[in-house]
């Protein structure tokens, strides 16, 4: 096998960027993602989240006039629990393209430009809906970056901040289509935005039974003993964290045997298992 720079970073336990599973067409203020470029995957949620996913999927699949409906969903919870994947897999199921906001380009230091950028994205969404023969999902990741609490005006920057909030509130009020917003910081979102979403749901960290299901259906399961498997299931981690371990195992097995000891060390290095107790005297 070829030892890549990415593999060397893995061996050093450096942070590595995730390889995107979908092809994103960068339009500046947003990314456009064709449903054909979304890689299908099986999602494992706790029962409450699974029920929500099934209901939303059925609702969207049965709604024949999505361009005249307001189907708005706010998903919140800890990082890595599958909020964004929820949106992508819904899109895959109903063959909807995704228009994802590019927050780094939306925000502007110039007065009035942030509001103008937000309007431009919503206008691009309406245009795509009008021209397309399939539904489109407007995806707002890290929604707290646009929907954070309005502030008391003490300087011009505060007024600028509140104006962009007001613009987005008005656009969401009149929105027709499908919008899914995700956030790790639900407490930072202004209460006025709560009323703009028909569905609000926490995507919780996986419970033990869900962790067992996730692990047993992962590539890691075939390489570990039952003892280590139970140890991992008893610990707390997110689907995204396990995915990162899977990537490491796949690349490291090119240069070494990935047995219980090696894989346990990966979990320990990422803080997903309690540290081993050291023997000795105090």
Image (cartoon, rainbow, N blue to C red):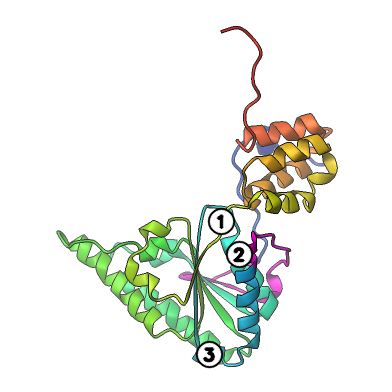
Horizontally, residue 272 falls left or right of residue 102, namely right
Instruction: Please report the residue visible at 17 percent of the width from the left and 62 percent of the height from the top.
Output: 153
Distance, label 3 to label 1, CA atoms, is: 31 Å
In the rendered structure, are the residues bearing label 3 and label 1 in contact, judged by CB atoms less than 8 Å apart?
no
Q: Mark 3 points at which residue?
A: 67
Horizontally, residue 87 falls left or right of residue 194, namely right
On the rendered image, what quadrant is the C terminus found in? top right
Q: Which of marks 3 and 1 is in front?
A: 1
Give x and y (percent) for residue 259. Answer: 82, 33
Q: Earlier in the sequence, mark 3 or mark 1?
A: 3
Q: Name the residue under label 2.
A: 49
Give x and y (percent) for residue 223. Answer: 83, 40
In the rendered structure, are the residues bearing label 1 and label 2 in contact, judged by CB atoms less than 8 Å apart?
yes
For disc 3, the neighbor class at 10 Å (few under 14, some 14 to 19, many from 20) is: some
Horizontally, residue 101 falls left or right of residue 36, namely left
Is residue 111 shown to the viewer in this render?
no
Q: Name the residue under label 1.
A: 204
| 259 lies above or below 37 | above
Q: Which of marks 3 and 2 is in front?
A: 2
Q: Give the extent of the magenta segment.
A: 23-50
Asked if the stretch drawn in magenta spans residue 265, the answer is: no
Give x and y (percent) for residue 191. Answer: 33, 67
Give x and y (percent) for residue 281. Answer: 60, 7
């Amino acid at each position: 096998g070829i030892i890549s720079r990415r593999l060397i970073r893995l061996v050093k336990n450096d942070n590595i960027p995730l390889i995107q599973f979908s092809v994103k067409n960068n339009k500046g203020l947003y990314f456009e993602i064709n449903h054909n470029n979304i890689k299908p995957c099986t999602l494992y949620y706790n029962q409450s989240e699974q029920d929500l996913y099934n209901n939303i999927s059925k609702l969207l699949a049965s709604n024949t006039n999505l361009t005249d409906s307001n189907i708005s969903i706010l998903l919140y919870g800890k990082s890595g629990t599958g909020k964004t994947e929820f949106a992508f897999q819904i899109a895959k199921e109903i063959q909807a393209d995704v228009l994802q906001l590019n927050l780094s380009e939306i925000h502007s230091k110039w007065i009035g430009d942030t509001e103008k950028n937000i309007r431009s994205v919503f206008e691009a969404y309406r245009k795509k809906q009008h021209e397309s023969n399939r539904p489109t999902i407007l995806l707002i990741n890290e929604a707290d970056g646009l929907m954070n609490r309005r502030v008391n005006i003490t300087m011009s920057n505060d007024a600028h901040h509140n104006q962009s909030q007001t613009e987005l509130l008005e656009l969401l009020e009149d929105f027709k289509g499908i919008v899914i917003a995700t956030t790790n910081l639900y407490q930072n979102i202004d209460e006025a935005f709560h009323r703009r979403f028909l569905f609000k749901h926490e995507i919780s960290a996986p419970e033990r039974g869900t962790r067992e299901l996730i692990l047993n259906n992962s590539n890691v399961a075939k390489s570990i003993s039952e003892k280590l498997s139970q140890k991992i299931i008893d610990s707390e981690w997110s689907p995204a964290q396990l995915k990162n371990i899977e990537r490491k195992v796949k690349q490291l097995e090119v240069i070494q045997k990935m047995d219980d000891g090696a894989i346990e060390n990966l979990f320990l290095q990422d803080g997903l298992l309690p540290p081993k107790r050291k023997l000795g005297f105090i």
